[in-house]
Amino acid sequence: MRIICAKDYKEMSEMAADIIGAQVLLKPDAVLGLATGSTPIGTYEELVRRYEAGRLDFGKIKTVNLDEYRGLTRDNDQSYYYFMHSHLFDHININKNNTNVPDGMEPDALKAGQDYENIIKNYGGIDLQLLGLGNNGHIGFNEPGDEFIDKTHVVDLTESTIEANKRFFASVDDVPKQAYTMGIGSIMRAKRVLMVVNGKGKAEIVKEAFFGPITPKVPASILQLHNDFILIGDVEALSCL
Ligand code: GLP
């Protein structure tokens, strides 16, 4: 595990874009695992800026996103499909046929999970997986529980996640109660994992996840076992270390 301290959100985003950008340059047909949430927005802005400056080419890149709310249509502005298009895909030269977000409208959870795992498998796995960190230690939507779940599956969102994410919806009742998420194994099989985290509110959970026991009660803690895991945090997020 490598921990990099950035002085602020802007520097964190630039450093993350440096690493993703290097992956794109070194392997123009790389498979990128992508994340949503407010933390990676600055990273996506940086990638778009570098594309516009002619420094990055996404023409052959393939992407798989971590998760999607169950029951939201793609044109819902709170869906992660919509988020990825408005923050990244609509602004770079990626072939949209090569971008993937779990299908939140697939009613059959088993099929949704298997279809998504097949996409990852057919791509030959993920080269670089970008992650944010939930307030309760979740990654993707792998919530704290009694066991690590391997593959893409349906999850019941915890009260704390629904509470944390209600800021994006008209009311708490509008926040979906379930989501499809890549599993812990789907994430851990990525060749490299890059997490971005910022702000004082994440300082305690960063310490617990990366300097505490490896436990499904803090899903991100399993990243301690990944042999190419980079954590980029701003000063505030790393302030408890
Ligand atoms: C959501 C996403 C996660 C994300 C987390 C933190 O629940 N499913 O992938 O990491 O929120 O979000 P934020 O970056 O807004 O703190």
Image (spheres, rainbow, N blue to C red):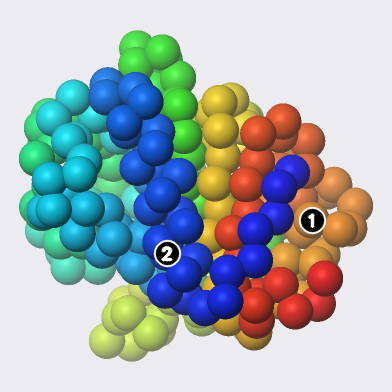
**Badge 1: residue crowd in 10 Å (few <14, some 14–19, many ≥20):** some
Residue type indicated by callout 1: Phe
Q: Earlier in the sequence, mark 1 or mark 2?
A: 2
123 or 118: nearer the viewer: 123
Q: Where is residue 31 in the image (x, y as percent from the top left)?
A: 35, 27
Q: Report whether residue 128 is seen.
A: yes
> From the image, which quarter does the N terminus lie in?
top right
In the displayed structure, 84 sits above or below 151; it is below
**Badge 2: residue crowd in 10 Å (few <14, some 14–19, many ≥20):** many
Q: In screen coordinates, is 89 left or right of 15?
A: left
Q: Position of residue 160 (x, y in %)?
A: 60, 75
User: Residue visible at 40% across and 81% down?
Assistant: 166
187 or 156: nearer the viewer: 187
Name the residue tied to disc 2: 13
User: Residue visible at 57% across and 76% down?
Assistant: 7
Where residue 173 sits, quadrant-wise, is bottom left
User: Residue visible at 65% across and 34% down?
Assistant: 228
Where residue 75 sits, quadrant-wise, is bottom left
Name the residue tied to disc 1: 210
For residue 233, the mark is none
Q: In screen coordinates, is 184 left or right of 225?
A: left
Q: Is mark 2 within 8 Å of ligand 1?
A: no
36 or 128: nearer the viewer: 128
In the displayed structure, 170 sits above or below 87; it is below
User: Residue visible at 41% across and 13% down?
Assistant: 124
- Callout 2: helix, strand or loop? helix
> From the image, which quarter does the C terminus lie in?
bottom right
- The total of numbered circles placed on residues is 2
Q: Position of residue 25 (x, y in %)?
A: 31, 31
